[in-house]
Image (cartoon, rainbow, N blue to C red):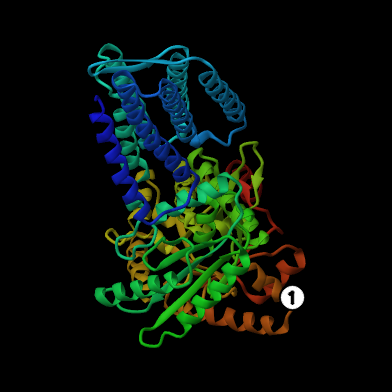
Amino acid sequence: MNIELQLCGLVMLVVFLVFIEREKKLNVKNRALFLAAFITCIICLIFDVVSIICIHEAVYNGFSPLITRIVCKAYIILLVTQGYCSFLYSCLDIAIRHSFRLVRMLTLGVYIAGEVLIVVLPIDYHMDGRLVYSYGPAAMCAYIMAAFFISVILVFTVKNKRNMPHRRVIALFTWQGLWLIAAMIQFFFKDVLLVSFASAFGMIVLYSQLENPNEHIDRMTGLFTQNALSLYLNDRYKYSDPFAFYTARIKYLVPSTELDIRKNAVMRSAAGFLELGKEPIFRIGDDMFCIIYDSSERAYQKLLEIKARADGVTDIPVEAKFIYFPDSSLLSGPDEVYNFIHHYDDSSEDVIVCTGDLVQQMRYRSEVYNLIENALRDDRVVVHYQPIYNISTGSFTSAEALVRIVKEDGTLIPPGDFIPVAEDNGQIIQLGIRVFEKVCKLLASGEPQRLGIEYIETNISVAQFDHENPAGFVQNNIEAYKINPCNINLEITETADNELQHLLLLNMEKLIKMGVSFSLDDFGTGRSNLDYFVNMPADNIKFDLTFTQGYFKNDKIKHVMKGMVSIVHDMDMKIVAEGVETKAQYDAMVKLGVDYIQGYYFSKPIPAEEFIAFLKDSNL
């Protein structure tokens, strides 16, 4: 009998099924549909073999023709069912779209109608040596249905390939291509029964390319990987399946060189999580894990258990931090889950609970981040200049450059809306670079200098100084725009650790030799501390707006500022009072003895064109 290829395919699938059942499983819709198609393929192969045996016995040994026809119909019914299961599996990536639901319902209707026709239509069979096949209206209907599902799968794969992983597209084309090639060979060589074997081989291809769980297992711990978490989260969010989960960072405070200790510590953490229950556990970082539960109550209970275990570790210093997500619906999908973890992972709190307010804050910060990125890309970062009045000369001899962002509709975004976010995520460096370049471009025109401006102040970050080429960023721009270094004053604000402070001093020394001057910004806010005040070779000290305004509201601040004026002048430095808004405040600062006045009393920060016009009106 001509059943060798079918038996070969059947043995392959059964062996693979045993391995599949023994492996660690990630319960996602994708896998469930694959298993349905896989098992249907096995049953279809069994009935293919049984139908050939029945035909052989009916032709040569008088076996019941009725039972033979029933078995033949069962085989082709299963063949169509396999095609339908394959369709559902293939189109899983677009299965929840509204436009696809109608197609799915129509396809289900075609499948049911086809199966009914196969049941009611007649079927017959033929066997002559190794040549064996079923024929008749029922068989023709089955072949049409199989061709229909293969065609639909190919069409949908081509149409939606941009919405599918490239690897999945290739695997689906290979799978369906094997079916088509086998069907064509069998059509021309009827004694070569390849279709069932090709179907089995195609399932093996799918398994190896798309469904192999070993690709989602962390080799060290045996837990699921971060890629597996993305797949799992995507599946549960796609089908609106609510859940709760938490992440745990169990950080063992041992030197990075102690690799064996760190490995054993990670393995200890993994073992502890495995003892909590059967829920899926993911290792998503060197020392971070994620565990997903169906109920928030169980999730929180297990979080407390693992926290108690971590707190009880005494042989190795350990730091445990948790982010608890009681309601998955607060977040829109895997991307927001990872964004939330990224935003709050560095929190000083042991346990962060994901709430609606925190999610809104994260979304706002993400929106601002994208807004800044787009503004940098589209050159919508602009500089406004706030004139600084020199009391000794009675004119405006300097200005501070302040960053602004213009929306696509032309309106300005208030600096308070984006600067704190930029400072936290590091974008302030790129903004500072862009501002400095625009300041250099304005100075290169020579217009501010002709109108009495001696220098323009711009903020600089320690991170903008390059380790290998000290002061390279500033020096390169000064040389590129051919401006006098004396026209540049850099404002330093942040406190650096000893290593960065040493680097900063090296850069400052080189720039000072070039002619660049420095100001210590935000004095009085805590951002510029006493250590900086003593050690930084700055020319100016800038009293922050809150410090200046405090002079008129708090007697202690008034006494401090009086003393600071004397100290600063004794150190041969100048003082800029920021935030001066009224004539009375101006008179008080002049009486106090400051050297420069900056604030709305004279002008708000204004665009370059208005700044030049202001200087023409005020200094000429």
Residue at far front of view: 62
Residue at far bottom of view: 314
Q: Position of residue 503 (x, y in %)?
A: 34, 68
Q: Position of residue 499 (x, y in %)?
A: 34, 73
Q: Position of residue 217 (x, y in %)?
A: 35, 57
Residue at position x 63%, y 83% in the image: 560
104 lies left or right of 505: right
Residue at position x 63%, y 43% in the image: 610
Q: Position of residue 4 (x, y in %)?
A: 23, 30
Examine the rendering and report whether any part of residue 499 can be seen.
no
**Is 254 situated above or below 382?**
below
Question: Label 1 sits on what residue type?
Answer: Phe
Residue at position x 54%, y 58% in the image: 340
Residue at position x 36%, y 24% in the image: 63
Instruction: Name the residue that disc number 1 marks.
Output: 552
**What is the quadrant of the N terminus in the image?**
top left
**Residue 202 occupies quadrant:** top left
**Residue 537 occupies quadrant:** bottom left
418 lies left or right of 488: right
Nearer to the camera, 319 or 154: 154
